[in-house]
Image (spheres, helix red, strand yellow):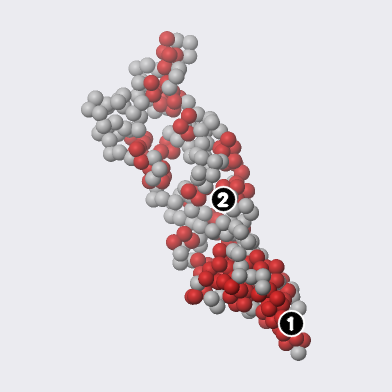
Amino acid sequence: MGVRRRVGYAATITVCVVGILSSGSLAAASAAGDECVECHEEYVRSFTGTPHGRSFGGDAELAGAGCVSCHGDGGAHLEAGGGAEMIANPARGEADLANRACLACHENRTATAQWRGSAHDAAGLRCASCHAIHADGVTAVGLRGAGEATSLCLECHPSFRKGLHQRSTHPLREGLMECSSCHNPHGGTNEHLIDADSVNDLCLSCHQEKRGPFLWEHSPVHEDCLTCHTAHGSNHPGLLVARTVQLCQSCHLQGRHQSVAGTETAMWNINRQCLNCHPAIHGSNHPSGPLFQR
């Protein structure tokens, strides 16, 4: 009898909420279950403005989805008068179990298909570690906090923060890129969660002028962009891993004009250094360019 009275009272609360929620949001609130609204009105109200809430309210196939879709049957929770241990919560508990509710819908989607066994999965992260399911007004993918993906990544990867403030860097600080522009946080087949078949394919997706093919190719360019460049920030121009002279001489040890400080060859250390004479270092299509001078 006590349970029935609680349900009846919850129905009254639901009617009160009708005037506040939009018609589309109301569908999600109703699907959530009147029992939930009684004690968790704040969560129901905020949920309707989230990506999930908007989908539940506007998609006919999802019209019947609600709290029980992620939290399971709340009968025992209701009979006990509450208690976190009596209800499933994807934001708590063992990560594998917590993520099952999310993966029930998202595992077969392209972006999240490789989550199982990924670096973040192995580290014990929950979907709710990065995504705020109940937060209203978040980004389209429901990111936690202010919805700034880069800031969210730096919470766990602080060693890359300095790269945002170095002399040469990708435009993450300006908001023109995000970590997810290059990495797929949900998993992938390549190391470091690179969101491409290879590092070069990823770099060339933006730097297409370096793609070639060239009549005269520079082998390090063809093999791996990271041979000469670092992706996360550098105090050298062009995201180089070292000063141009030092970088070139790390391979070309027997060149005709080695740069030695204090000698006449020190002139090669000024201005753009090796690139003064070899500007087409990524490859050349000029018939006279085997030394990348054109």
- For this orientation, the residue located farthest to the bottom is 1
User: Disc 2 designates what residue?
Assistant: 149
Image location (x, y in percent) of residue 138 = 60, 58
Q: Secondary structure at mark 2?
A: helix
Residue at (72, 85) in percent of width and height: 8
Which quadrant holds the N terminus?
Answer: bottom right
Residue 98 in the figure: left or right of residue 78: left
Please, which residue is most extreme toward the left here?
A: 287
**CA distance for labels 2 and 1:** 41 Å
Residue 110 point in image, percent of width and height: 44, 61
User: At 50% across and 39% down in the image, what residue appears?
Assistant: 170
Q: Locate residue 209, reporting x and y percent.
A: 34, 38
- Could you tell me if the residues under marks 2 and 1 are in contact, i.e. CB atoms within 8 Å? no
- Neighbours of disc 2 within 10 Å: few (<14), some (14-19), many (20+): some
Q: Amino acid at mark 1?
A: Tyr
Q: Secondary structure at mark 1?
A: helix
Name the side, left or right, on which 22 lies relative to 250: right
Residue 22 in the image: above or below residue 217: below
Q: How many marks?
A: 2
Residue assigned mark 1: 9
Q: Is residue 171 left or right of residue 257?
A: right
Q: Is residue 39 left or right of residue 158?
A: right
Front residue of this view, candidates 290 and 52: 52
Q: Looking at the image, is mark 2 or mark 1 earlier in the sequence?
A: 1
Q: Amino acid at mark 2?
A: Ala
